[in-house]
Amino acid sequence: MKVKGTAIAALPKFIEHKFGSAGLEQWKNALSTEGQKIYRGAVMLSDWYPIKESYLEPTALMCEQFYRGDTAGARELGRFAADFTLKGVYKAFVKMHSVKAFCNRTVDILHAYYDPCQAKVVLVEDNRATLQLTLFPVPSEYAELRIAGWTERAFEIHGRKNIRVEITRSLVRGDDCTEFSGTWE
C-alpha cells in the first residue's frame, strides 16, 4: 500500500511546531533507515511512498516519543494536517460547498491520498454524516486516528461547530470497514 506525499508532509511540520527543532531531530534520528531516507530528503507532495515506512511507523514513533505511547497524538496530527493541506484557496473551496458535497470531496481526498483505498459516504443529514473506509489493505489504528482527526478539523474549517468524529467500526478491530461518524451543531 502507498501513501501520497501530501499526506506525509505534515508530519515533520507538526513535530517541529509542537516539539521544536530538537524534537524533530530526535524523531528523525529514531526513524528506521527507510524512514530516514524519506524524511531527511525533500518529501515530494506528488510522489507515492510506502505506507509502513513513511506514514504508519513514523506516526507510531511520534506517539511513543512525545505522547508516552498514547495514540491520541495521531488524531492531533490529523487535525494539524487538515490545517496544513486545506489552507489558502483550498480553505475557501472547502467552505463553499454543501455538507453533502463536502463529504463527497473528503472521500475523493482519501482516494487521492491512499492507494489502494475505497471509501464512501453512507449518511449525510443536517447535523451528522458517516463515511466508510471499505478498502485499506494495511489496517492501522494510527491511520484511522489521523483520518478521524483530519476529517474532524476539515468539518470545522467547513464551518460546523462542536464537531466530533468517532470511529464506530474499525478494520483494525476486524469489522468489514472503518466507519467515521461525525456529529455537529
Image (cartoon, helix red, strand yellow):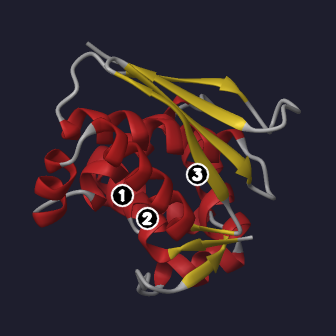
- Residue at 20% over, 40% down: 157
Task: Residue under label 1, please give it.
Answer: 22
- Residue at 58% over, 82% down: 48
Percent across and percent down for residue 53 are 69, 69
Spatial CA span between label 1 and label 2: 5 Å
From this viewpoint, which residue is outermost toward the right? 174
Q: Residues within 10 Å of mark 2 (few under 14, many from 20)?
A: some
Q: In the shown orientation, is residue 82 left or right of residue 39? A: left
**Location of residue 124 (image quadrant):** top left
In front: label 3 or label 1: 3
Percent across and percent down for residue 126 are 32, 20
Q: Residues within 10 Å of mark 1 (few under 14, many from 20)?
A: few
Q: Amino acid at mark 1?
A: Ala
Contact (CB < 8 A) between labels 1 and 2? yes
Label 2: element kind: helix
Query: Closest to the observer: 42 or 30?
Result: 42
In the displayed structure, 49 sits above or below 102; it is: below
Label 1: element kind: helix
Percent across and percent down for residue 93 are 17, 57
Quarter of the image that includes the N terminus: bottom right
Q: Which mark is residue 92?
A: none
- Residue at 42% over, 85% down: 44
Q: How many marks?
A: 3
Spatial CA span between label 3 and label 1: 17 Å
Q: In the shown orientation, is residue 96 left or right of residue 75? A: left
Label 3: element kind: helix
**Location of residue 135 (image quadrant):** bottom right
Residue 19 seen from this side: no
In front: label 3 or label 2: 3
Task: Residue under label 2, please give it.
Answer: 25
Q: Amino acid at mark 2?
A: Glu
Q: Which mark is residue 59?
A: 3
